[in-house]
Structures are given as structure tokens and as C-alpha cells.
Amino acid sequence: MLTSHELADAEHLNCDLTTVYRMAQRGQIPYIRVGGPRGESRFDWDAVKDALRPAEKVDPWINPRARRR
């Protein structure tokens, strides 16, 4: 588990610490809170990578449920 400071550094996300908190609050990246409601946020790097992976685009002509008849 990584702290928010470790997650924001250059080896992981390479972004500002505020961005990490904002993404967590919006539900874009998973986290757990250690130490109660005012405790420190912890992040699982593998779960964060999976959450930030771009979604595959679905072609409506391939997906029969998305196609109207």
C-alpha cells in the first residue's frame, strides 16, 4: 500500500498531490482510509493502474445489444 505522497511521485503517477486527492474523492482511483474519517489515505498501486487504464471502445456494430433493429 502506498501513501498519497508516494503515489504522486515521479515513479508512479507523476502528478501533483492535489490531483491524487481529487481523483480519489471523485472515485476515479480506489483508496482506503487508515485511522478513521480523518486518517491517512492509502492506495494499492495495482488497483490504481487498473482504474486508470483506458476503457476499450465498443463498436455498436459488433455489440448486438447496442445495435438497433
Image: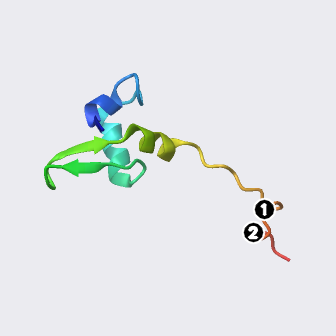
Side of 26 relative to 64 (left or right): left
Residue 13 position (above or below residue 31):
above
Marks 1 & 2, CB-CB < 8 Å contact: yes
Indicate the quadrant where residue 4 lies.
top left
Side of 48 relative to 41 (left or right): right
**Which disc number belongs to residue 60?**
1
**Which disc number belongs to residue 66?**
2
On the rendered image, what quadrant is the N terminus found in? top left
Helix, strand or loop status at disc 1: loop
Side of 23 relative to 65 (left or right): left
Whether residue 16 appears in this view of the structure is no
Helix, strand or loop status at disc 2: loop
On the rendered image, what quadrant is the C terminus found in? bottom right
Give coordinates of residue 39: x percent, y percent: 15, 48
Amino acid carrying mark 1 in the image: Pro
Residue 65 position (above or below residue 26):
below
**Disc 2 packing (10 Å; few <14; some 14–19; many ≥20):** few
